[in-house]
């Protein structure tokens, strides 16, 4: 058990390439198949706004199961103990909180497209630019962190070179998202969520059959009692940080807003609630792998690949294959969603809003596809260097994300939220949160950013209330009449 | 003196999480079949 596992290969490279080929080609074929349903740009972007409960629940859960969930949760458990694993679970609160918000978004903007569009209509140009920058920065951070995680994981598991693994994962996701849009993203999300859940359950049950929790507990009590501490200070800080990070990410990101717009009326709230329940146990199941490492005497040289190393060490080739598939599905389920949602945002809120106000449906469809491919290329370029650990890359965005929570909530529910105060809240929350991130620690960034933003939003709304007419959101996003469209097509 | 999470809570958390994940997988498939039967997939 004391082998220096990360030095050797956990899976034969040939097997790794074969798995990549089978799943990669499978996702692309499904993307082309489902893509036939996307007749218009709206269909491509929002899957016809008619997604049902099963696919809605699966896509909410699968998108939130990133490779960070399956790779970082064991790292959290290994470094911060059982409370660290539980801390990761609190990220599901974002899905629970978003459930009523999804219903509210669908009611206020039944024909809306993006979260940035909402901010622009609700608060005006200054808030729009700030929010747009935060959204783009965060989307790219998330994309880069996952593509990097993919390359690192595939290399650690099977010896597939980092650059090759990262390139293949990105290329596959770009291909099926271009062909199938949100139809392909949501369809594959369902299959991926089942594979992830089943894979993790099988790995956990096989490990539990060899080492029950009681046995792991007793060994940890002897060798690493801090990992069982109920009051591990860093773990408690991570708990709040993770919860706020999850809430901030889900409230602001267009990944979730596009799903709220895409789900059939009456489905959104239930789907996000159930999606949160589906997601809730996953960090703990994955975290158990991290806790098992010191208890079983498995030498972990790099904590960010602790989960795969433990699975392969305990279960041999089968464990490595299962983890490989789970990690690949976790990556694909999130990268495709980010590509689709970020391309919507760039197409609608930058290209159409600023440069192509009168674009036809066909032109917009072309723009969406070009943007998806462009995003893939930019992500690939940013992933060429791998200088930071996964946690650092991910949590650097924490203060930015935290500072958007209250502007979004106030914008959806408070009629008198002040637009200037909201812009100031995002600006100061980000600045002071990043200062805390640099000077105190990564786990305080989101907490400080959220607190500062909250104070400014509440104070500005209380002192300088500004009335808003909710009907403006519905009217401004109303679709054009067929007569208008015919006139536009004829003019061009 | 470190205040440790009791062993029974530790075991409950691990077994509970694995059981919930298994139920979630089966539940998703059941939901899909219901939606499909009602023509409400998408």
Image: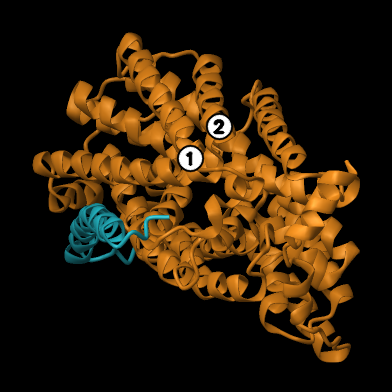
Chain colours: A orange, B cyan
Which residue has dot 1 on it?
A184
Query: In the image, is residue B27 above or below residue A79?
Result: below
The quadrant of the picture occupied by the C terminus of chain A is top right
Q: Give the chain of mark 1.
A: A
Q: Is residue A226 left or right of residue A440?
A: left
Query: In the image, is residue B36 above or below residue A25?
Result: below
Dot 1 alpha-carbon crowd within 10 angstroms: few under 14, some 14 to 19, many 20 or more: many
Residue at image coords 21%, 38%? A203
Residue at image coords 58%, 37%? A145
Q: Earlier in the sequence, mark 1 or mark 2?
A: 2
Question: The residue tagged with tag 1: helix, strand or loop?
Answer: helix
Question: The residue tagged with tag 2: helix, strand or loop?
Answer: helix
Which residue has dot 2 on it?
A179
The quadrant of the picture occupied by the N terminus of chain A is top left
Q: Position of residue A217 (x, y in %)?
A: 20, 52
Q: Position of residue A240 (x, y in %)?
A: 53, 66
Judging depth in this view, the residue of A114 and A31 nearest the camera is A31
The residue positioned farthest toward the top in the image shown:
A14
Q: Is residue A347 left or right of residue B13?
A: right
**Residue A319 at least partly seen:** yes
Query: In the image, is residue A357 above or below residue A231?
Result: above
Judging depth in this view, the residue of A387 and A469 nearest the camera is A469
Dot 2 alpha-carbon crowd within 10 angstroms: few under 14, some 14 to 19, many 20 or more: many
Q: Give the chain of mark 2.
A: A
Q: Are marks 1 and 2 in contact (CB under 8 Å)?
A: yes
Q: Are marks 1 and 2 on the same chain?
A: yes
Q: Is residue A197 left or right of residue A243?
A: left
């Amino acid at each position: 058990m004391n082998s220096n596992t990360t030095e050797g290969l956990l899976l034969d490279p040939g097997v790794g390439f074969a798995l990549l080929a089978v799943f990669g080609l499978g996702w692309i074929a499904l993307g082309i198949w489902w893509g036939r349903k996307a007749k218009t740009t709206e269909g491509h972007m929002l899957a016809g706004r008619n997604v049902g409960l099963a696919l809605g629940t699966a896509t909410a859960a699968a998108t939130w199961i990133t490779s960070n969930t399956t790779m970082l949760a064991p790292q959290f458990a290994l470094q911060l103990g059982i409370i660290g694993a539980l801390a990761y679970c609190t990220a599901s609160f974002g899905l629970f909180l978003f459930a009523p918000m999804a219903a509210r978004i669908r009611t206020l903007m039944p024909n809306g497209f993006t979260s940035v569009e909402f901010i622009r209509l609700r608060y005006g140009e200054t808030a729009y630019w700030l929010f747009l920058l935060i959204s783009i920065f965060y989307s790219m951070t998330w994309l880069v962190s996952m593509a990097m995680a993919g390359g690192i994981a595939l290399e650690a598991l099977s010896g597939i070179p980092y650059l090759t693994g990262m390139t293949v994962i990105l290329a596959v996701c770009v291909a099926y998202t271009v062909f199938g849009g949100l139809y392909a993203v949501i369809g594959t999300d369902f299959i991926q969520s089942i594979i992830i859940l089943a894979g993790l359950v099988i790995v956990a049950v096989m490990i539990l059959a060899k080492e029950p929790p009681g046995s792991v507990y007793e060994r940890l009590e002897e060798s690493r009692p801090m990992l069982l501490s109920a009051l591990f200070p860093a773990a408690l800080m991570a708990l709040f940080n993770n919860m706020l990070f999850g809430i901030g990410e889900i409230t602001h990101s267009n990944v979730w807003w596009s799903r709220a717009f895409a789900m059939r009326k009456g489905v959104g709230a239930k789907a996000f609630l159930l999606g949160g329940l589906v997601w809730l146990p996953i960090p703990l199941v994955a975290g158990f792998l991290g806790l098992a490492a010191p208890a079983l005497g498995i030498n972990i040289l790099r904590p960010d690949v602790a989960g795969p190393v433990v699975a392969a060490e305990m279960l041999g080739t089968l464990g490595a294959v299962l983890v490989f598939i789970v990690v690949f599905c976790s990556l694909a389920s999130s990268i495709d969603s980010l590509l689709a949602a970020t391309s919507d945002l760039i197409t609608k809120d930058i290209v159409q809003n600023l440069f192509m106000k009168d674009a036809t449906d066909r032109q917009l469809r072309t723009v969406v596809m070009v943007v998806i491919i462009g995003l893939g290329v930019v992500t690939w370029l940013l992933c060429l260097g791998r200088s930071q650990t996964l946690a650092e890359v991910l949590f650097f965005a924490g203060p930015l994300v935290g500072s958007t929570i209250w502007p979004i909530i106030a914008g959806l529910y408070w009629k008198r939220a002040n637009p200037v105060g909201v812009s100031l809240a995002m600006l100061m929350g980000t600045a002071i949160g990043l200062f805390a991130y640099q000077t105190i620690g990564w786990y305080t960034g989101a907490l400080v950013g959220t607190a500062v933003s909250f104070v400014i939003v509440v104070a500005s709304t209380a002192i300088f209330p500004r009335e808003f007419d909710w009907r403006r959101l519905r009217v401004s996003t109303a679709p054009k009449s067929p007569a208008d469209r015919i006139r536009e097509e004829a003019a061009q | 003196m470190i205040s440790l999470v009791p062993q029974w809570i530790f075991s409950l958390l691990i077994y509970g999480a694995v059981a919930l994940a298994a139920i979630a997988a089966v539940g998703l498939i059941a939901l899909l079949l219901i939606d499909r039967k009602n023509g409400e997939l998408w």
